[in-house]
Structures are given as C-alpha cells and as structure tokens.
Amino acid sequence: AKCRPKREQGKGWGLITVNGVQKGKLVLEYVGEIIDEKMKRNRLDAWSKDHPNDPNFYIMQLQSGWYIDAREKGGLSRFINHSCDPNCHLMPVNVSGYMRVAIVASKNIAPGEFLSYDYHFDTQDGDKFVCRCGASNCRGTMKEGK
C-alpha cells in the first residue's frame, strides 16, 4: 500500500495510508537488518546507555534467536505505532525458506488513517513502555497482556 510518515499527536512519527487498504490486504513488509540474539542485546544495551531518556527502538523478532533491526536500514513500516485496538496485524510468511514479516490490514483502513498494530512487547519493564493509543480497551502499556 502507498504510505507516508506523518506526525501523530502525542506519539511522535506515525504512518498513514495514502489510498486506504482493504481488510486482509498487505500493507507493508517489516524490513531491516537481520541480527542474532547477541547483536540484539548489544544494540539495545548501547542504545539505552547512549539515549537513557529515549526508549524507542525498532527491533522485531523474526523467528527464535533472529530479529529484524529497522533503526538504520529499515523501511517506512518502522513508523507504524502501537495500539491496543489496532487496524493491522503481523503475519509471519515463509518465502522460499526465508521468514519475513507482513503487516496486514485487520479492518478496512481509510485514506489518511494512521496505521497501527499491537506491539505485544515481551519485557519485564512494561512501565517504561506507556501506551498512548487512547483506545477504550487500552492496557496502559505496550507490554503483552497485563
């Protein structure tokens, strides 16, 4: 889908769809550098040390022990914000033996609407990841469950 970054009130950068997307259709692929567990830990530790007041990061699990880091070599999908009532979901896809992550519309999305998916962070520090989605079912955190 054709998308573009746009500032989202209270959330920093977000991503909108230009022409809209129908439910079940591919929005984008989450792309970036493929890294292992050790590299992920090193990058997260370095980021938190160098940027103690900025908890933003762009690392998504691809499969057990492997991650996609979109900070330096990512695409527009890294701008999609979290929501507890998202309009997209992630779908792992095997393409010729290689795992990839598709972002798919969970409902019809109007032109100009911000895209979102539930981050389901796997973290012990849920209080560091405050949710600002404003949904009626908001968990108050980007952490999985609550």
Image (cartoon, helix red, strand yellow):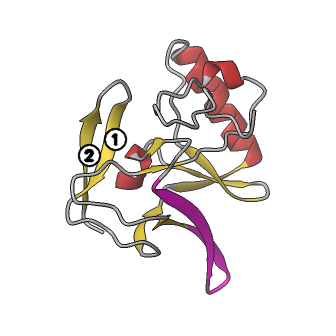
Which residue is outermost to the front?
Answer: 136
Q: Say which mark, if any, is on residue 14.
A: 1
Q: Say which mark, if any, is on residue 31.
A: none
| Secondary structure state at the residue bearing disc 2 | strand
Q: Amino acid at mark 2?
A: Pro
Residue 139, percent from left and from top: 63, 32
Q: Quadrant of residue 123?
A: top right
Instruction: Identify the residue at image location x=22%, y=52%.
Output: 112
Q: Is 89 colored magenta in this rendering?
A: yes
Q: Amino acid at mark 1?
A: Gly
Residue 75 visible in this rendered orientation of the protein: no
Q: Main secondary structure of the magenta part?
A: strand
Viewer-side residue, 93 vs 138 = 138
Question: How crowded is the residue under tag 2: few (<14 C-alpha within 10 Å), some, or many (20+)?
Answer: some
Tell whether 18 sits left or right of 57.
left
Instruction: Identify the residue at image location x=63%, y=19%.
Output: 128
Residue 122, percent from left and from top: 74, 39
Tell whether 117 sits left or right of 127.
left
Q: Is 67 colored magenta in this rendering?
A: no
> What segment carries the magenta color?
87-101
Cα distance between the residues tagged 2 and 1: 6 Å
Q: Are marks 2 and 1 in contact (CB under 8 Å)?
A: yes
Q: Say which mark, if any, is on residue 5.
A: 2
Which residue is outermost to the bottom?
Answer: 96
Depicted 47 relative to depicted 75: above or below: above
Residue 15, percent from left and from top: 32, 48
Quadrant the C terminus occupies:
top right
Instruction: Identify the residue at image location x=70%, y=25%.
Output: 126
Residue 43, percent from left and from top: 62, 34
Instruction: Identify the residue at image location x=72%, y=23%.
Output: 125
Question: How crowded is the residue under tag 1: few (<14 C-alpha within 10 Å), some, or many (20+)?
Answer: many
